[in-house]
Image: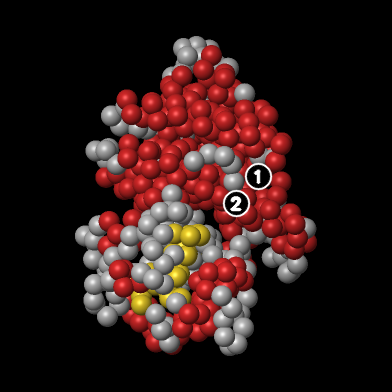
Amino acid sequence: MFTRKCLKVSASMGCCFVVGILVVTGSVLAWAESANSAGTGAATSESAPPQAPEEITVPEGTPAQLFQFIEKLSKELGPPDTQGLMVFRQKQARAIITAADKIISQAGTDASTIDRALQWKFQALLQLLRMRDPEVQKLLPEMAQQLVSLANRILGGKPPLKEEDVKAAAQWALMGARLGGPDLRPDVTKIPEKIEQLGFKDVATSARGGVLALRLQMHSQKEKDALAAELKKYLDEMLGSLSQKGSPEETEIAVLLQILSQLEYAELDVPAGQYCQKFGELLAKSSDPTIVETGEQLQGIGRRLELPGKKMELAGKTTDGKDFNWAQYRGKIVLVDFFATWCGPCRAEMPNIKANYERYHDKGFDVVGISIDDDRSALDKYLESEKIPWTIIHVQDPSAKGPADPARYYGIVAVPTTMLVGKDGTVLAMDVRGEELGKKLEELLGPADAKPTAPVSDPKASTTKTP
């Protein structure tokens, strides 16, 4: 799964390393989950490479000396043969983890030193993860506990505490809960209150948002109403806070994006579209081009989420270079399909769309495809091989704005994304795919003439986030 570029907010790797590595935690947790469901034997069903008789010896020393050891070790290439290299990489990662832990044990409440060691440790864990090393199954929950413990160590330090250290502690705790799952959530939910008691109100607010983002991922049916109320309160407070700030902080935006990106699918009584639009308008006023881009994307997502029951606007250039004429589709039921040739789920859904097009086109059904491909040649080859009979919009002009760039205008962050549009141009339903498409068309246009049955696809399992 990939995240659309304009939803990213780059973060420096100083204290708060978690913001910088947040993107990769999804792959960490996904693999850990799949390995758990398959059992440890699944990851080691093939014969494991032989272990070398001697491990890399980690020396004793000061944090500065241990960092020098880690940096030198990380640059070693290892043996040229594949099997030997794999063994070396495993030992290399384990040695870095050991050295990092030695540094952390000596660092006391020096948050910057701890944070630097955590960066090395996490990168070593990722190395073991990529190698499907079964030891990761033990190391990930251990690091989760360590992160929460380190957060409490910093917050319990002798005052006065530095704000950057408190921010780091908050991020460590949130990362710990992400890696450790629901068992660590009770400990982490106490962190924002501790931070507020220390006098760091803004940091506490951001940490509270991070906890809410975690609860969005892990909430039960029983707490839906309470969670929705807390989310509304938090988002309203953030709207007020950000409107008074000339330049929002990266950590604030990162937490905000976590919440807003999950709200779309959370099925809570929270107006996700309205909040996306409001926050988008605020961020779009920033002097930072990256934040402006994020704001514009949020506005687009909000616009899309608010589409049902409203008129949809479409413009742009078609693949034959002509201006797209949306008005000519009035009087028809139209499926607007955002897709990409590199998207497997899009390809899997295409036979279903084509079959319904053949069955219902004569009764007033049409399709407008909107390709988000960067590679025009790949798109042309695909359209030719698939014999697509409907109009395709493909925007290649980077200066295109508004409805003339539909994917950006509607904040498309996953494909396929579809909208079923009524005869008057009003959006009737979102993400209508698979068997549901045929059922909707029969409701709207009556039974189709007997023609080949539309292939069935799985609409829930068929979504790929855009790169």
Reading the image, the residue beneath label 1 is: 140
- How many other residues sit within 10 Å of disc 1, few (<14), some (14-19) or many (≥20)? many
Side of 90 where 362 appears, left or right: left
Residue 248 vs residue 160, the one in the foreground: 248
Q: Tell me, yes or no, whether the two marked residues, 2 and 1, touch with CB atoms within 8 Å.
A: yes
Front of the two marks 2 and 1: 2
The kind of secondary structure element at disc 1 is: helix
Residue 467 vs residue 387, the one in the foreground: 387
- How many other residues sit within 10 Å of disc 2, few (<14), some (14-19) or many (≥20)? some
Reading the image, the residue beneath label 2 is: 28
Tell me the tag on residue 392: none
Residue 429 in percent (x, y) is at 50, 60
Q: Residue at x 53, y 79 (%)?
A: 356
Instruction: Tell me where residue 383 sits by quadrant.
Output: bottom left
Give the Cα separation between the discs numbered 2 and 1.
9 Å
Query: Is residue 322 in view from this perspective?
Result: yes
Residue 361 in percent (x, y) is at 46, 81
Q: Which residue is drawn at 48% across and 80% down?
A: 363
What amino acid is found at the position of numbered circle 1 in the picture? Leu
Q: Is residue 189 above or below residue 297?
A: above
